[in-house]
Image (cartoon, rainbow, N blue to C red):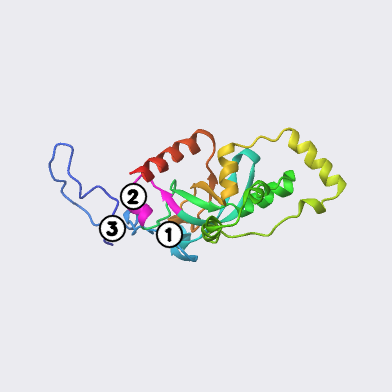
Amino acid sequence: MGIVRSRLHKRKITGGKVKIHRKRMKAELGRLPANTKLGARRVSPVRARGGNFKLRGLRLDTGNFAWPTFAIAQRARILDVVYNATSNELVRTKTLVKNCIVSVDAAPFKLWFTKHFGIELDAARKGAKKGGKDDKKKSAKKSSTAHGPKFDVKKASAALKRKWAFRQKSLKIEKAIEDQLKVGRVLAKITSRPGQTGRADGSLLEGAELQFYTRKLDKKKGK
């Protein structure tokens, strides 16, 4: 039992040493950090106290991400780790921890948005496209994001179109998120503990939180 969480080996507030009068207890043991990386899913079970099991996420690449404004969640692919308040080293090594900021594939959210509101977010982009070298660069960037199944708005029934018209009356979507959806990458934060639960779930960044982290990322790019 190398790693312990007891304070017997620590000094007193006055600076004096504590005399260790007993051996270590099983309840005080600590374990090595999981250091969950971005990659094909690999999870290993670890037996914990009471016969319970922790799921040690060694590598993860997908998670369930909530969209708080519309109270929905979609399973999406994690594309990259972009920011971590603790250390840039965790960004460089693509380590997944709670509260790290990741970029997520926008395809599942775009598909839900199109089905629910009848609005194609890619439509405006398609109209603006023109041939040339820029197209090749864009297609190379797009290849990094997964293209999900498409939904044809024109084939919708009359009843569904009436539903869409009713929903669109009260529709409000943040411009920053709309722009991200069009690009194909959305910023999100991980709210689960990958090293303890073997999952990398989280929620999309919105409002003041999104503005805060966008400023941080822009500042980072400027250096």
63 sits to left or right of 81 = right
Classify mark 2: residues with Cα within 10 Å, few (<14), some (14-19) or many (20+): few
Q: Quadrant of residue 62?
A: bottom right
185 sits to left or right of 173 = left
Q: Please name which of the two marks, 1 or 2, marks the residue nearer to the observer.
A: 2
Could you say where residue 168 lies in the image, as x and y percent from the top left? 74, 37
| Residue at mark 2 | 88
Classify mark 1: residues with Cα within 10 Å, few (<14), some (14-19) or many (20+): few
Residue 88: in magenta span: yes
Name the residue rendered at 60%, 48% in the picture.
182
Name the residue rendered at 58%, 55% in the picture.
76
Q: Nearer the viewer, residue 138 or 34?
A: 138
Q: Please name which of the two marks, 3 or 2, marks the residue nearer to the observer.
A: 2
**Secondary-structure class at tag 3:** loop
The label on residue 3 is 3
Q: Nearer the viewer, residue 191 or 19?
A: 191
- Where does the C terminus fall, quadrant-wise? top left
Q: Nearer the viewer, residue 25 or 187?
A: 187
**Amino acid on which the number 2 mark rests in the picture:** Asn
Classify mark 3: residues with Cα within 10 Å, few (<14), some (14-19) or many (20+): few
Could you say where residue 9 lies in the image, as x and y percent from the top left? 20, 50
Q: Magenta residues?
A: 81-92
Residue 90: in magenta span: yes
